[in-house]
Image (cartoon, coloured by chain):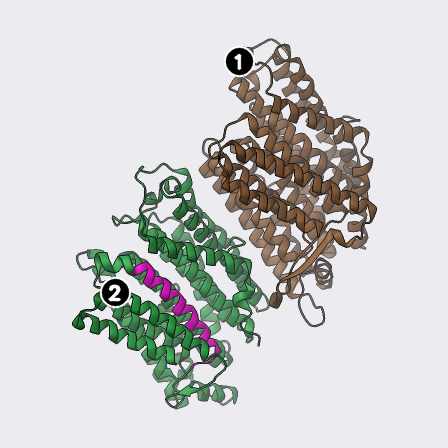
Amino acid sequence: MLTGLLIVLPLVASLLVFMTKGNASRQLALGASVAELALAIFVWMSYRHNPDSSLLSLDCTWVKSLAIHFAVKADAMSLLMILLTTFLVPLIILSSFSTNYEKPQNFYGLILLMQMALVGVFAATDGFLFYVFWELALIPIYFICLLWGGEGRAHITFKFFVYTLLGSLFMLVGLVYLYNHTHVNGLHSWALQDIYDAGRSLDASQQGMVFWLIFVAFAVKMPVFPFHTWQPDTYVNAPTQGTMLLSGIMLKMGTFGAIRWLIPVVPMGMDQWANTAMVLSVIGIVYASCIAIVQKDFKRLIAYSSIAHVGLIAAGIFSANQQGVQGALMQMMAHGINVVGLFLIADILVRHTGTRLISELGGIRAMNGNFAVLFLIIVLGAVALPLTNGFIGEFLLMNGVYQYNAVMAGFAGLTIILGAVYMLRSYQGIMLGDKKESSMSFGALQSTDKLVLIVVCAAVIFFGVFPGPLNELAEEGARAVISNLK
Amino acid sequence: MNGLFIISGLGILAMLAEILKFRKAVLPLVLVGLVAAFAANLREWNTPVTWFNNMIAFDHIALSFTGVILVTAFFWFILAGDFFRRESVITDHSALILFALVGAVMMTAFKNMNTLFLGIEIMSIPLYVMAASRKEDIRSNEAGFKYLIMGSFASAILLFGIALVYGATATFDLDKIASLLSSGQELPTFFYAGVIMILSAMCFKVAAAPFHFWAPDVYEGAPTLVTAFMSTVVKTAAFAAILRLFMIVLNDVNGVWHHMLAGVIALSLIIANFTAAVQTSVKRMLAYSSISHAAFMLMVVLANVRSGLSIEAILYYTLAYSAGSIAAFGVLYSVSRNNDHSIDAFNGLAKRNPLMAVCMSIAMLSLAGIPVTAGFFAKYFVFTAVMDSGYKWLLILGAITSAVGAYYYLKVIIAMYFREGDKHPIEENSATKMVVIIASVATLVIGVVPGLVAEIFEF
């Protein structure tokens, strides 16, 4: 019931926001997203109180003849992702206050609509519903990128949309294939557990086929090498809030999907192909890191760093062991928070100096010391220094990949070194050194920007020092998945 | 059956209006008549009666497809009010369209090869005239001419096929042919040749590749609303006929027509989608898109699952496609007043007329098959129906070409929201506005609650 409310609330709010005008829309959107966060925390509390509470799930028939249910449930893993979404959306909305978008009611309405779809993806326990929310999430972000994006947006959003749609259609074929193999009292079913059973009843070659059909959709979304070509351009050209949604939350749809709707479904397919998926992920880590090092544009650098990070997450997922999956969940949380912070910093740099090129920036620390400190904390979180939120996830991930294959762990481990290289070098280039001409104009931050950065930094440190509550959820979620594998 | 009588009567009434001078009353009369026909249709549900020595029968399939046709026609007439006023003669032309409707309804309900042929001809001949109805426009003339020549050719092939089937079975009656087939009796080779010829002719009517060459030219040349009629009502009727012929009667003729149909579908998917992607005219793009949608519906026929599921799939698909098309053509009609159907005519529509832009976006997303529009469920039904058959490779092909499809549907959306157009706002009359809104809302409603349509067959 409460989980259903989590989906309905942003939907209603977005409809209301569409009807408002001017600045009222962003205040309403912010209020709604904060209310959603409060609701999510309440759900979390009731989960801690009683994980099997009937308040946490909702199941009603949608299309009877096709056995489609509107079935949602907040279990450990979903809850983790819902918390991430509901935590980030208010920050994303707040971060937009310093920019004046045309037609704000549409902008904020679309963001809330996107939130609805994202929460739906994470909460769905019906295969069909999952797919519907999955596709639904694409539409608002498409319009956000298209209407408020940068130069060349038409061409780039196009590529993004067609690319992800193609992946999704393959997934639909795969899911329908599974659905047709479900048998519950002589009928088909879309329920998660029945899909699992159907997947396991297939023979090895069928499982291999289903693996690829579904894997492609998730691989495009994450993105895993070589399905990543849409990502850097889209991230760079989307409006900052769009990039934050894409990298902070939408990317997690891919990794979350892989954990819930891929690895437990086709264990034999995993036996055959997990190795290939791991190799692709590790190639992505090294390849994207190397490209990130030579990037001149800071926003593009973050885009590539995101591919590297998600490569490690994917490697952890396909290692399919407790540490790998748990680490993936933790790292998804950490990466979501950090990357939103980083993209906001890129946005602030552009607004204050007019450029994102690292070579044209320098010495900003002397202009604004507070900003330098906040930036540094987020950078440290991104390079996964101990006592920041990035550390525990990365540690678990390395552990998981190592258990799977030591050589791969060796290559994946390069991300620690290369990540430090490109993040610290860009920090050095932008903040330290001699003052460049463009940095002269860098003044005090706007209060909303400062607030978002402080919250992000607080989260980086807080979850680095006290990962306990989140880690509990991640551990439980991972255990549920792993126990399903056996 | 009473519905059929009512429509025929309406057609005659529309012709009389010219003589008796009550032209102004034609449109309201037609609309009321269509509602009456729909009601009569509804009353016949669950009363299986055959007419004229088993020539025609309104069973559930016939009634449900007739329902789709009547609803589409109702909204088409509202949309067409403006078209009739501006560039055509309401009495003659609405009579023609009404007679085409009679043919369409017959095509859903035939029980005999003769009725099928009659239905197809009654539907086609008025459309040849309608396609050429913009007399001063050379392209309209070309469209009518091309449609007539190609259409007659297809009719001849159909007739030849029917003759061969008759030669082999000594009957025109579908039930008798079906019972002969299921008795396992050896049939002469030319029976199969006849089946192939009938299939070719039907593929021509739904414009599936390689029988599609007429479609882009005719769709582009004919007045926009005639094109809308052709891509909705005609498609629905043709699919009802194909459904009855190939899934219910000739289902057991295995191996013969399946291979051919698989080839036709694959070709249609590839040719239609890739050609549509490079079109600059929206009208032509919609023509190619209708070919690709025909291929999807044919997939269900090919999958050959003899259960309620396939009928639901095609019924739902025709309804979803008709709703999306009506909305799209309605907007196209308003946008391209000066006969400019190119995609540039849509530039900046979001600013010039936001409501139209939203409706067009919904229609495009539905045609592209994005949830939660009707187009998505339509594709989904196809996927479930085909999944169990031996034609999974067609599904993969369908998925790939659908992504190409998204490319050209999105081009329209991008033009509306992203490109700068000339500033002057688009005016639409209230009737067009109403139909376009209703069609796009319907697209969303049957997308969110597909059970409304999908569950009327509980076999």
**Horizontal side of residue B264 vs A360, given as left or right:** left
Residue A98 in picture, x, y percent from top left: 55, 25
Number of numbered discs overlaid on the protein picture: 2
Question: Which quarter shows the C terminus of chain A?
Answer: bottom right
Identify the residue at horizontal 51%, vertical 72% (top origin).
B311
As for residue B224 lying within the magenta part, the answer is no
Check the image and report above or below for A59 versus A93. Answer: below
Answer yes or no: are tags 2 and 1 on the same subunit: no
Our reading of the magenta stretch's main secondary structure is: helix
Q: Which residues are magenta?
A: B58-80
Residue A254 in picture, x, y percent from top left: 64, 45
Q: Which residue is mark 1?
A: A438
Q: Quadrant of residue B436?
A: bottom left
Looking at the rendered structure, the kind of residue marked 1 is: Ser
Say which mark, if any, is on residue B130.
2
Which of A275 and A70 lies nearest the eye of the viewer? Answer: A70
Q: Which chain is represented by brown in the image? A: A
As for residue B66 lying within the magenta part, the answer is yes
Report the chain holding disc 2.
B
